[in-house]
Image (cartoon, helix red, strand yellow):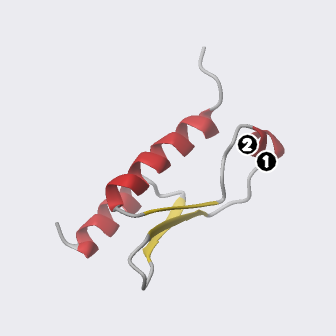
Amino acid sequence: MSFDRHLAEIAREFPEWTIWRSDAGRWWATRHHPLSAEQREAGCAMTIDADTPEGLREQLIEQRERTAGPGP
């Protein structure tokens, strides 16, 4: 899959993040809004990075779960 397609798919799946690939080839995501104190305490990050688009997607899923808080 092409770089542009990976970028578009991840951006569509995680609209609350800005997704990009650096000149060095790393994949990055940063949130559009600041984190609350509770989110920071839960281990949420403002910006994350990974070697591959798949790695970034995995981290974004983990961040989504952390943001959602504890389950029922």
Q: Residue furthest left?
A: 1
CA gap between label 2 and label 1 equals: 5 Å
Considering every residue shown, the one lying at the far top of the view is 72
- Between 70 and 50, which is closer to the camera in this rendering? 50
Quadrant of residue 16 within the rendered picture? bottom right
Q: Is residue 3 left or right of residue 39?
A: left
> In the picture shown, does residue 19 fall above or below 66?
below
- Residue at the spot 47% in from the left edge and 58% down from the top edge: 15
Categorize mark 1 by other alpha carbons within 10 Å: few (<14), some (14-19), many (20+): few
Which residue appears farthest toward the bottom when viewing the image?
23
How far across and down, in percent of the image, does residue 29 sit?
52, 64
Instruction: Give the residue at the far right of this rendering.
Output: 37
- In percent of the image, x 42 and y 85: which residue is there? 23
Residue 68's quadrant in the figure?
Answer: top right
Residue 62: image x %, image y %?
A: 51, 41
Q: Which residue is drawn at 66% across and 59% down?
A: 46
Residue under numbered circle 2: 39
The mark tally for this picture is 2
- Quadrant showing the C terminus: top right
Callout 2 touching callout 1 (CB < 8 Å): yes
Q: Residue at x 46, y 43 (%)?
A: 61
* Picture quarter with the N terminus: bottom left
The percent coordinates of residue 48 (x first, y second) are: 56, 60
Per the image, the residue denoted by label 1 is 36
**Could you tell me which secondary element the residue under label 1 belongs to?**
loop
Helix, strand or loop for disc 2: helix
Amino acid type indicated by mark 2: Gln
